[in-house]
Amino acid sequence: MALLEARGVTKIFGQLAALGGVDFTVEEKQIHGLIGPNGSGKSTLLKCIAGAELPTGGTIRFSGRDITLAPPAERARVGLSLKFQLTSVMPPLSVYDNVLLALQARTSLPGLVFSRTRGVLHDRVMGLLEEFRLLERAKAPAAILSHGQQQWLEITMAVAREPTLLLLDEPTAGMSLEERRATGELLRPLKRSCAMVIVEHDLDFIREICDVLTVLDQGRVLDSGTVEHIQKSAKVQEVYLTRV
Amino acid sequence: MIGKAVGAARAAAPTRAFPRASMIPVLEVCLLVIFAGLPIVLKDFWVVFVTRVLILTLLSLSFDLVWGFAGIMSFGQALFFGAAGYGVALVARDLGIRAIWVVLPLALVIGLLLSFLLACFVLLGRHPPSIIFVALGTLTCSYAGDRLARGWYYLGGQNGIPSIPLMTAGSYELGEGVAYYYLALVTVVGAYLVCRFLVRSQFGLALAGIRIQEARMAFFGYKVQTLKAIVFSVAGAIAGLAGGLYAFHEGFVWPNMLGVVLSTQIVLYALFGGVGTLIGAVIGVVVIEIVSFVLADNYQTVWPILLGVLLLLVILFRPGGLISLVVPERERIGAFGAVSGRRKHVGGEAVDGTA
């Protein structure tokens, strides 16, 4: 059984069909790239999976459970985690508190009120900050981090909850070449613990990190397969040569 | 070796969000000492005046808790204050129950239940409500409460309920004066400590997240609206407690206690002092009430205009309120989940685990 199965997902905004019946499958511990020209529906599909948008039609199943209409919090509790396209860290809070905020989401209400998990989660926060190269900035407000570091913090927060499926919307947007390379290094080891869906415009990055690619065009799946298969696909080349 | 290096790096890394708070505790202690000593130096009239100010600080605290920490714009705190005041006044008038052990917990419960009921309608809907919806919803309920009390004969209509019997503690009757002052002070300190504990806990961190990026919090798995309803109800309980104290202190209740004017006044108290620190809300009430009294005493006709200009100037030039004059922004943002006094050992090195 696939980890994520989206069948015939449609999303209509007024007169515009952003998704026109998309089938999309992600296997466990697979890094699945979602690419396509601007407006092809990549981010909309990701939002439908995460719960930021509700699909107009179709079904989405995660670990065998129908989550098509589930609210985002419920999806998060069953193992889905999203990194937004625009960084949505908490700028006034310290980097440490940003990560703690993500980690403590599973703590019960009495646990939160009496700060029962603060001590337990401390080591985990420090470990994550170290893993994502943010340890030196632990006490700094997230607002003063560079754009690249904010992206890393956002990824750290998404990873902190130990999801089984991590959804990353343009994780390298606005990053320098060096930062992109470092982001690839940070993400690759995560494959051991969770599957990922990555929406990205940087095709070199996608080629390096993904196992499988799905190409969207005008709200429909144009092609899907391994990186080699997509690289040789005539349909994909046509779209990219004529419209990208 | 790598493990040792990691341990050292972790130990060296600061775990505290920001430098240890310094100004807020100083202000808290100073105000507590001043309030504790005031009855010794004040005449009876002033003791009554400051008791009223203390009770209003409870209301201001309740607003700061919902707006300053959870980002819920409530224009309805007076509803819980007034409803609890009316509740205990009726119990004292019709049932003759006025024991402090009954009436104050009753006031708290009335505030708690009413605010929870309102939260169910305003906050716990299918879709997350907007700030405007919550502000208008609570404002409307406050207005409706005022109109209901004015038109209901059983509640005394426009005149409210006069001559409420004195609250009792055993055989002792608690009327206006030093005893009531200290009762109010102990209640304010107790409520303040509860709020302080809450907002500095991991629960407070969750509230901060909701205030800053509410939409993001749901994607972490937080039940955002439930957390908001809880903090709204706690604040309602504090407002209710204030209403109970106020009713017995003044000896009467009237529809204005429920209405829009008082609800708005509470917002101004907190904004003037500075939201999101608790102590700012207290300072706001103290300064506005003292300045209002002095202005009204010296400029009988134009004092509201002078007060309005003063409020406007502070809000224009000091959006952080008076507290921002002495407390840096970092400290106002707060620290969370303190593991009081304990030190952790990570990688063989002692690390301060407090936030």
Image: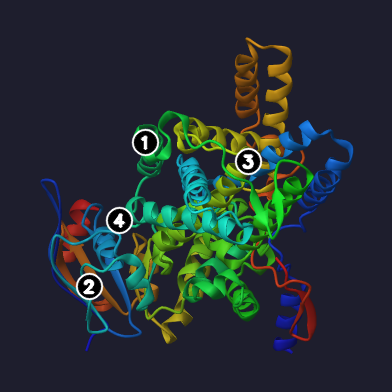
- Circle nearer the viewer, 2 or 4: 4
Name the residue rendered at 64%, 22% in the picture: B313
- Which element carries disc 1, helix, strand or loop? helix
> Relative to the observer, which residue lies in front, A64 or A149?
A64
| Disc 3 + disc 4, Cβ < 8 Å | no
Instruction: Identify the amino acid type marked 2.
Output: Ile
Q: Position of residue A149 (x, y in %)?
A: 56, 60
Q: Callout 1 environment at 10 Å: few (<14), some (14 to 19), or many (20+)?
A: few
Single out the mark in the foreground, 3 or 4.
Answer: 3
**A104, above or below B193, in the image:** below
Inter-mark Cα distance, 3 to 2:
69 Å
In the rendered view of the protein, which quadrant contains the N terminus of chain B? bottom right
Mark before the other along the chain sequence, 1 or 4: 4
Dot placed on the residue nearer the N-terminal end, 3 or 4: 3
* Front-lying residue, B140 or B328: B140
| Discs 1 and 2 share one subunit | no
Judging by the rendered image, the residue that carries numbered circle 2 is A230
Parent chain of label 3: B
